[in-house]
Image (cartoon, rainbow, N blue to C red):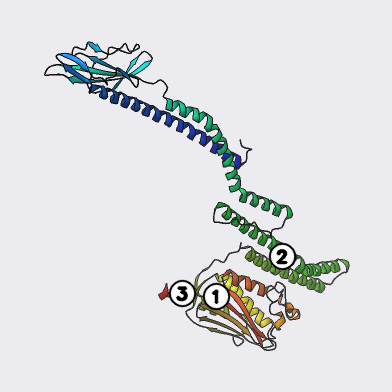
Amino acid sequence: MKRLSIKVKITIWYTLLMLLMAALLLVFLGLVSGTVSTQTSMTQLDQTLRGNLRQVDMADGSLQLGEDFAFYDNGVYTLVYSQSESLLAGQVPVGFTANEPFQNGLTRPVSVGSARYYVLDFWVPLGWDNGVWVRGILEAPENPQLLTNLMLIALIVMPLLIVLAALGGYLIARRAFLPLDQITSTAAAINEAADLSRRVDIPPGHNEFSRLALTFNHMFAHLERLFDAEQQFTADASHELRTPVSVIKSACEYAERYGETPEEQRETLSMIHRQADKMTALIGQLLSITRLDQGTDMAHRERVDLSELVQSICREQTYSPQRLLPEVEPGITARVDTALLTRLLQNLIDNGFKYGKEGGHVWVSLRREADEIQLTVRDDGIGIPKEQQEKIWQRFYQVDPSRSGDRGGAGLGLSMVQKIAQAHGGTMSLESIVGLGSTFTLHLPADPPPETI
């Protein structure tokens, strides 16, 4: 039973249910037919006996029976007894040997051995103090024809109906489970081909299978993002770590091959230390971006005073206050992840000074515009050519790699900025003119004003 498919199991249970319902129906019909047969027999006895009552009379002290009086009619035996219960007319059925007392107007069953009879008595007054008993006796049918016919029909028709019901149930189950078979086949094909970009066709409607297919598609999309992020991380790490690893390896080989003075050894160790720090920072940035891609590093947002946060970040910078100029609108609050937003603003400020002109400036502004909050970082640096503005959000892309110098830039800052903006439900925009500078703006959805809540 455990190895059977769900369709077969449903068909078996459906067939057993049909058999149970058929059995209950037969029992019900048997009970109903028995009741109907009993009621029909009693009605037949009552009507026949009442018809004979109208034919009973007394004339000149003797009993007179009319021409329409029938001693045997419709299976009913009619007998006439005196007041002292002596038989005056009629013949008792051969098998009826019971000494049944008279009861006026009461139809009752009387069993004699294995036979069963219905008996009905009426007292017919014929004068002031005289009268007769008229008794009707009807032998109950042993096998009512209706019940026999029903059982015969059931024995012939029910097996055919059960087979048809089982076949129909299997076809219905097979058709109902067809979307599940398609989902299973597609999932198996995706597994065999290792192609996570494929999706399961969603069946029409809003039933369990369409929801299952939609859930599978969400799962495949999530797995595809995880797989792509893993591949991206592996490719990025192998690409960017190759240079510092090569530098460290070369320094070690040179130190092993040639004798070095203490000063040269200190310089070699210092270089190895710088490269190790660069690798550590690079790996940390790659892990942060990968976690944001995968959704494992979720933004833990809480309501903060954004104006105070931006001013605090600007005050903590090591850049000269004459070069870093904040313009913050007071009283702006928002639900943000403080750590992530701090990293976003720090990256934009560092980027502005890194690619700025000698002695240049960076302006940080925060303001509310209609239904959004705008955090802007503007510099008066080299600017970004129009054809490169779409590429700056890519990992490791640098407009002018020679400008990164010793600051350890790897082209991950703006990619991180965009991921953080997306994690807050916001977007980044850029306006830049070569030779005049660039303006990066974070657009965050603003909360509704208090009076509209």
Q: Residues within 10 Å of mark 2 (few under 14, many from 20)?
A: some
From the viewer's perspective, tell me whether residue 42 is left or right of residue 131. Answer: right
Name the residue carrying label 1: 444
Camera-near label (2 vs 3) is 3
Q: Quadrant of the C terminus?
A: bottom left
Report, in whole angstroms, how far the alpha carbon at label 1 lies from the one at label 3: 12 Å
User: What is the three-letter code of the residue carrying label 1?
Assistant: Leu
User: What is the three-letter code of the residue carrying label 3?
Assistant: Pro
SS assignment at label 2: helix
Which one is earlier in the sequence, the residue at label 2 or at label 3?
Answer: 2
Q: Are marks 1 and 3 in contact (CB under 8 Å)?
A: no
The quadrant where residue 349 appears: bottom right
Report, in whole angstroms, how far the alpha carbon at label 1 lies from the one at label 2: 28 Å
The quadrant where residue 41 appears: top left
Name the residue carrying label 3: 448
Q: In the drawing, what numbered circle is on residue 232?
A: 2
Q: Are marks 1 and 2 in contact (CB under 8 Å)?
A: no
* Residue positioned 28% across, 13% down in the render: 90
Q: Residue furthest left?
A: 128
- In front: 13, or 212? 13
